[in-house]
Amino acid sequence: MMIDKISSIPLMQQGKNAGWNNQVNRTPQTDSITLSAEAVEKGELYRANALVESAPDVRLDRIAELKKKINDPSYINDTLVSATADKIMDALGF
């Protein structure tokens, strides 16, 4: 039994001669994203929250300064007591 060749080569040559362009046109494309206003706001809140959580709960320098003032006998005088009393009265609405 004899099998003749199938004429596949002329079909392939027809495709090349049909004017097909073997070059791929590549256009530069850039990736981009767009964030909604809500996403931007949530990002800012997240950064602010992280900043607050990283801050120390106690300001030791301020505490040391106040302890020094309170331990100084000349710090507590009539002027300080009067000013403190006035602030308390204002806060209570009197």
Image: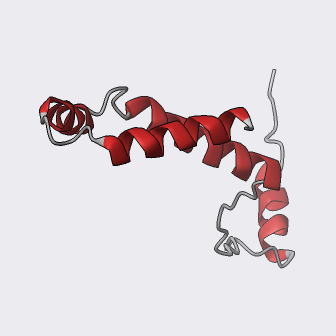
Q: Which residue is depicted at the point 32% across and 27% down?
A: 58
Residue at x 14% of width, y 29% of height = 71
Which residue is farthest bottom?
19
Q: Residue furthest top?
A: 1
If the image is split into quadrants, where does the C terminus sit? top right
Q: Position of residue 33 (x, y in %)?
A: 71, 57
Most foreground residue, 10 or 20: 20
- Residue 50 placement, left or right of 11: left
Residue 65 horizontal/vertical position (percent):
19, 39
* Relative side of 61 to 34, left or right: left
Please give left or right for residue 25 compared with residue 4 in the image. left
Position of residue 53 relative to residue 93, above or below, is: above
Q: Position of residue 79 (x, y in %)?
A: 36, 48
Is any atom of residue 56 visible in this view? Answer: yes
Q: Residue at x 70, y 71 (%)?
A: 22
Looking at the image, what colour scheme do you see? secondary structure
Which residue is more in the foreground, 90 or 38? 90
* Image coordinates for residue 76, horizontal then vertical, percent: 26, 37
Identify the image quadrant of the N terminus.
top right
Query: Is residue 14 positioned above or below 54 on the image?
Result: below
In the image shown, does 29 or 45 lie closer to the viewer?
Answer: 45
Is residue 36 something one can see in this rendering? no
Of residues 77 and 51, which is closer to you in this image? 77
Which quadrant of the structure image shows residue 18?
bottom right
Question: Could you tell me how many numbered marks the image carries?
Answer: 0
- Residue drawn where x is 68% and y is 61% of the image: 32
